[in-house]
Amino acid sequence: MVKNIGIGTGRRKTATARVFVREGSGKITVNGKDVNEYFATAEQIQVVTQPLMVTGNENKFDIVINVTGGGLNGQAGACLHGISRALIQVDQDNHAALKANNYLSRDSRMVERKKFGQRGARRKFQFSKR
């Protein structure tokens, strides 16, 4: 049986990522696929690996991520948040570096809901005088 040494939940927009940190060699798995297969762009992959780079743990841990909801950019942000939280459970010394880079704060920006009698959240239907 594989033992998780750190567990973290990350959220961004409507995406939620459950992150499990295990002893290993630096392999990152997202929903059963390698991180390079799952995410479409290099920027998204870089976002996911940033907490490991900042703390110097690139090749120390295997990371298993289950992510649901949202699009790929939101999911990448959720993974960053979850990995950061899990790394603090592994070693409390990581807290200062992660906090300095603002990886521990939840980005609370969400899509504003559509209101009734309007075309969108803020957009109104065209006014007709006659």
Image (cartoon, rainbow, N blue to C red):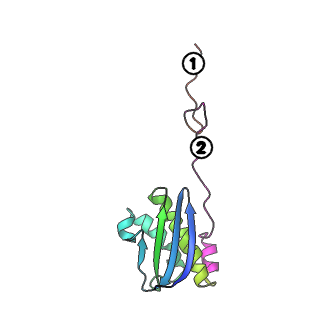
Residue at the spot x=44%, y=86% of the render? 24
Mark 2 vs mark 1: give the one in front: 2
Q: Secondary structure at mark 1?
A: loop
Magenta highlight on residue 115: yes
Q: Secondary structure at mark 2?
A: loop
Q: What amino acid does circle 1 point to?
A: Ser
Residue at the spot x=64%, y=83% of the render? 92
Q: Position of residue 122 (x, y in %)?
A: 60, 37
- Front position in the image: 15 or 124: 15
- Front position in the image: 118 or 52: 118
Q: What amino acid does circle 2 point to?
A: Arg
Q: Quadrant of the N terminus?
A: bottom left
The span from disc 2 to disc 1 (Cα, nearest Å) is 25 Å
Residue at the spot x=50%, y=85% of the render? 3
Q: Is residue 112 left or right of residue 40?
A: right
What are the residue bounds of the magenta stretch? 95-119
Q: Magenta part mainly helix, strand or loop?
A: loop
From what the image shows, is residue 115 above or below residue 4? above
Q: Which residue is mark 1?
A: 128
Question: Residue 113: which disc?
Answer: 2
Q: Position of residue 59 (x, y in %)?
A: 44, 84
From what the image shows, is residue 94 above or below residue 34? below
| Circles 2 and 1 in contact, beta carbons < 8 Å | no
From what the image shows, is residue 97 above or below residue 124? below
Question: Residue 19: which disc?
Answer: none
The part of the image, by quadrant, that contains residue 33 is bottom left
From what the image shows, is residue 91 above or below residue 51? below
Q: Residue furthest front?
A: 1
Q: Position of residue 130 (x, y in %)?
A: 57, 13
